[in-house]
Image (cartoon, rainbow, N blue to C red):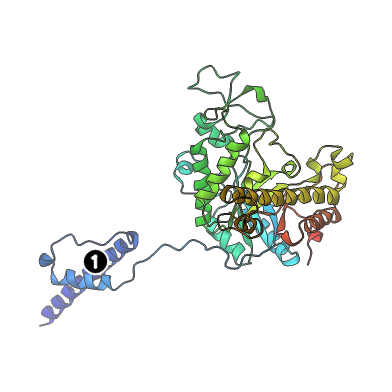
């Protein structure tokens, strides 16, 4: 009798162990492969009673799922007041503490964080095929989702910056897409990369493969919760031995301005419904040509939500609007530039309405007059201006008052069209007195 009880207890113990082990294995399988349907290897008629019990238990256990990526900010600010942050700064806990203090003590409500900087490296562990294949990540930001959540939890609007055609890393792994040096290249199959005065190589601005690579980076960043994508270096090179430049794709049959306009249009088509912005040379606000780099401010107006001219007073040539050193006159330089930009936009809008009126109806007809004075649904909304301003010493020692003058000039020139500003300092340390609460 005693032996029988021990025997029975031993059998129960074995069955319990088998049952729990089976459940554990089945549960682990469900967790590891929750994206795939669970299939039973055997025919249902051949399943033993204990296997049916196990399967019923497992079916009642909710499948584990991967955590959702961060969502965009639900209440983005209408007026953006941003500072620029490199990937390395964004990935440093000490700098994030600095940012938190900046948010508490100033009106800064946005940050521009590098997704791909001018060095070509992607700043976080992207799962994109080319990024993984060619090891194009520098891991400056250890966990992109944690960073997005950290900033969003403080109600901070996050703009991801992508340096597009200036890209020494992608140029190296994809030389067939890069600008090459005609003077040094002997074999077209083995191009020698052209480099600018800073020793940096560039991608061909007309390459669809290059376009798609940068669009894929934008989409990946938006998936991770970035609120907006900012495109920089969207132009042809501007310095170096230009006579040695060779393009693998661009054949010169269209103007550089048209080539860049085509890219602008491609970005808008590829990222419908997303907030996107374009960085342009400050001189695009006043020049009437493309300055040899393909940038014409009117060509960007219908393709972006924001245009960000880099109106750093230090970057204007001596003698600009009569000043021997424009950097010492931030208010006048910024105001003149942004007034010109707004004038260009107003003229562009007027011209496109007149063009539609002339093409559809005789000038002077009621329909034509209606087109002139009332918005037409065929018109794409025009971009708002949100310039980059400087908070760094170049040409002059920039005090808090001088940076304030840049902001005031932006407000005064744009009036009701004022949409904010973005402050650039390569050190990522900003003058708090500029926008103190």
The N terminus, quarter of image: bottom left
The C terminus, quarter of image: bottom right
Task: Where is residue 321? Give x, y as percent.
Answer: 86, 42
Residue indicated by mark 1: 22
Relative to 395, does residue 112 appear above or below in the rendering?
Answer: below
Task: Where is residue 378? Give x, y as percent.
Answer: 55, 55
Q: Taking 222 as reference, is 423 left or right?
A: right
Visible residue check, residue 247: yes
In the structure shown, which secondary structural element does the residue marked by tag 1 occupy?
Answer: helix
Q: Name the residue rendered at 46%, 41% in the picture.
A: 130
Relative to 78, does residue 228 appear above or below in the rendering?
Answer: above
Image-quadrant location for residue 98: bottom right
Q: Name the residue rendered at 51%, 49% in the picture.
A: 269
Can you name the residue that lies furthest to the top here?
186
How many numbered marks does the figure carry?
A: 1
Task: Where is residue 273? Give x, y as percent.
Answer: 53, 57
Q: Work out whether residue 289 or residue 192 is closer to the camera in this orientation and state it.
A: 289
Q: Work out whether residue 357 or residue 14 is closer to the camera in this orientation and state it.
A: 357
Visible residue check, residue 390: no
Mark 1 surroundings within 10 Å by alpha-carbon count, few (fewer than 14), some (14 through 19), many (20 or more): some
Can you name the residue that lies furthest to the bottom here?
1
Q: Taking 324 as reference, is 361 left or right?
A: left
Image-quadrant location for residue 133: top left
């Amino acid at each position: 009798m005693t032996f029988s009880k021990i025997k029975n207890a031993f059998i129960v113990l074995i069955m319990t162990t088998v049952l729990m082990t089976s459940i554990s294995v089945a549960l682990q399988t469900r967790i590891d492969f929750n994206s795939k349907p669970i299939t039973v290897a055997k025919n249902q008629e051949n399943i033993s009673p204990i296997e049916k019990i196990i399967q019923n238990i497992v079916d009642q256990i909710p499948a584990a799922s991967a955590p959702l990526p961060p969502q965009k900010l639900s209440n983005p600010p209408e007026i953006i007041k941003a500072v620029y942050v490199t990937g390395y700064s964004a990935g440093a806990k000490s700098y994030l503490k600095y940012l938190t203090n900046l948010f508490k003590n100033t009106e800064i409500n946005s940050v521009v964080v590098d997704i791909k900087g001018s060095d070509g490296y992607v700043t976080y562990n992207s799962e994109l095929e080319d990024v993984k294949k060619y090891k194009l990540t520098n891991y400056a930001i250890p966990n992109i989702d944690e960073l997005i959540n950290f900033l969003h939890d403080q109600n901070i609007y996050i703009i991801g910056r992508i340096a597009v055609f200036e890209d020494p890393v992608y140029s190296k792994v994809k030389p067939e897409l890069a600008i090459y040096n005609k003077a040094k290249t002997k074999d077209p199959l083995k191009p020698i990369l052209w480099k600018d005065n800073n020793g940096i190589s560039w991608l061909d601005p007309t390459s669809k493969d290059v376009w798609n690579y940068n669009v894929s980076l934008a989409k990946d960043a938006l998936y991770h919760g970035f609120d907006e994508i900012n495109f920089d270096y969207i132009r042809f090179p501007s310095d170096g031995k230009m006579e040695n430049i060779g393009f693998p794709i661009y054949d010169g049959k269209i103007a550089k301005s048209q080539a860049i306009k085509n890219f602008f249009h491609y970005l808008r088509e590829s990222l419908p419904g997303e907030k996107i912005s374009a960085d342009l040379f400050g001189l695009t606000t006043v020049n009437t040509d493309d300055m040899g780099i393909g940038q014409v401010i009117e060509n960007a107006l219908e393709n972006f939500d924001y245009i960000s001219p880099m109106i750093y007073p230090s970057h204007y040539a001596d003698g600009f609007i009569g000043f021997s050193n424009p950097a010492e006159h931030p208010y006048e330089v910024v105001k003149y530039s942004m007034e010109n930009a707004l004038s260009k936009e107003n003229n562009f809008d007027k011209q496109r309405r007149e063009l539609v009126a002339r093409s559809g109806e005789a000038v002077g007809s009621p329909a034509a007059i209606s087109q002139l004075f009332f918005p037409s649904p065929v018109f794409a909304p025009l971009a708002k201006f949100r310039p980059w301003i400087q908070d760094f010493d170049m040409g002059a020692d920039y005090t808090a008052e001088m940076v304030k003058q840049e902001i005031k000039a932006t407000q005064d020139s744009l009036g009701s069209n004022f949409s904010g500003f973005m402050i650039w300092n390569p050190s990522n340390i900003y003058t708090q007195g500029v926008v103190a609460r």
